[in-house]
Amino acid sequence: MPVSDFEMISAWQQVLKLSNLEPGQSVTILTSANTHPQTLSAALVATQSMGAVVNRLDLPPVNADKALSRDALAYLGTTPLTGNRAAIAALKESDLVLDLMTLLFSPEQHDILKSGTKILLAVEPPEVLVRLLPNAADRERVRAASARIRQAREMHTVSDAGTDIRFALGDFPAISEYGYVDEPGRWDHWPSGFALTWPNEGSAEGRIVIDRGDILLPQKSYVSEPISITIENGYATRIEGGVDAELLSAYMASFNDPEAYAFSHIGWGLQPRAHWSTLGLYDREATIGMDARAYEGNFLFSFGPNNEAGGSRTTACHIDIPLRGCTVRLDGVDMVRNGKVLDGH
Ligand SMILES: O=c1ccc(O)c[nH]1
């Protein structure tokens, strides 16, 4: 449902307060052709109402000649910031960047975070942002799950649909996504609510079955017949099934990049206010599908780059696949059982 300007400004004020925005701090609002006007206008009012020194940096869109989708998370690597020294300098000089454009998985983002700048991504429609407004309880829960991941050496995920896959852990950080940026140098995504990490390079082994009703992103489709994926030495080596499997295979093959078949992040959803069913209520391009990524109890895995985690693999292809009904074990201990998050995890 539509959101009033008052509600959107109040939502921004809550998120900025949780992000410890102080009077006098510099905020740059990063925009491009896909920026939502109400999200932008409310951010400009909210930041100024909190005494920040605000500017807006609008960058021309890129990748039109290469991407098969308009979803900014579908084609990674080069962003409107790539090679733009003046823009990068301005963002490094900022205390806080509100990314209403999508920098995720870009080398430039790392560069800017290293300078201590905080970056908050916010590109979902206003009503999704308002419904999934973050709070301190989300933060505690996600950080507790990330702490469990940090201590673990193996993630083992199984399901009645036939998933049985093991990942060695420990070479990459455990990440908490809870929707605000309360520490210098932190990146987060509003809305979110999940814990994730990356498997040690080459360690993923087994099979993943994407069952009926599971979601493919950026396709934003609910799979209608199971897709069975064989994983060997960290790469998807076979993708089998019906037309959904053929569509996924054809899309990944279009990148003509073997790294598209490697694992990106793995973890589970912890956002009780996000829903598996929401995606079916939206036009395909009206959302990037954060309800699907964050709904409580999913097993979210992805194919594509690991440079986000400090790895060396980059690829333009990124596929996020949240699965229902999985059991996710860390070192033999269930964190999620048949799609239900166990208390304290
Ligand atoms: O917030 C996000 C969004 C997409 C993704 O792949 C990871 N985290």
Image: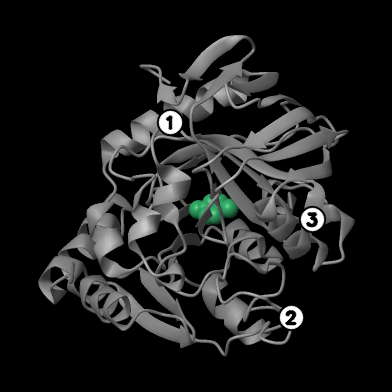
- Asked if residue 327 lies left or right of residue 339, the reply is right
Determine whether label 1 and label 3 are within 8 Å by CB.
no
As measured in the structure, the alpha-carbon distance from the residue carrying label 2 to the one carrying label 1 is 35 Å
Ligand 1 contact, mark 2 (Cβ < 8 Å): no
Q: Residue furthest top?
A: 332
Residue that badge 3 annotates? 260
Q: Amino acid at mark 1?
A: Gly
Pick whichever of labels 2 and 3 is earlier in the sequence.
2
- Element class at badge 2: loop
Image coords of residue 269 (percent x, y): 45, 37
- Crowding at label 2, few (<14), some or many (≥20) Cα neighbours within 10 Å? few
As measured in the structure, the alpha-carbon distance from the residue carrying label 2 to the one carrying label 3 is 15 Å
Is residue 315 in sight in this rendering?
no
Q: Amino acid at mark 2?
A: Lys
Residue that badge 1 annotates? 297
Hey, which quadrant is residue 36 in on the image?
bottom left
Hey, which quadrant is residue 319 in on the image?
bottom right
Pick whichever of labels 2 and 1 is earlier in the sequence.
2
Residue that badge 2 annotates? 66
Looking at the image, residue 215 lies above or below residue 8: above
- Crowding at label 3, few (<14), some or many (≥20) Cα neighbours within 10 Å? many
- Element class at badge 1: loop
In this view of the protein, which residue sits in the foreground, 4 or 229?
A: 229
Say which residue appears at 43% left-offset and 54% top-offset. Answer: 290
Say which residue appears at 26% left-offset and 43% top-offset. Answer: 135
Q: Amino acid at mark 3?
A: Ala
- Asked if residue 38 lies left or right of residue 309, the reply is left
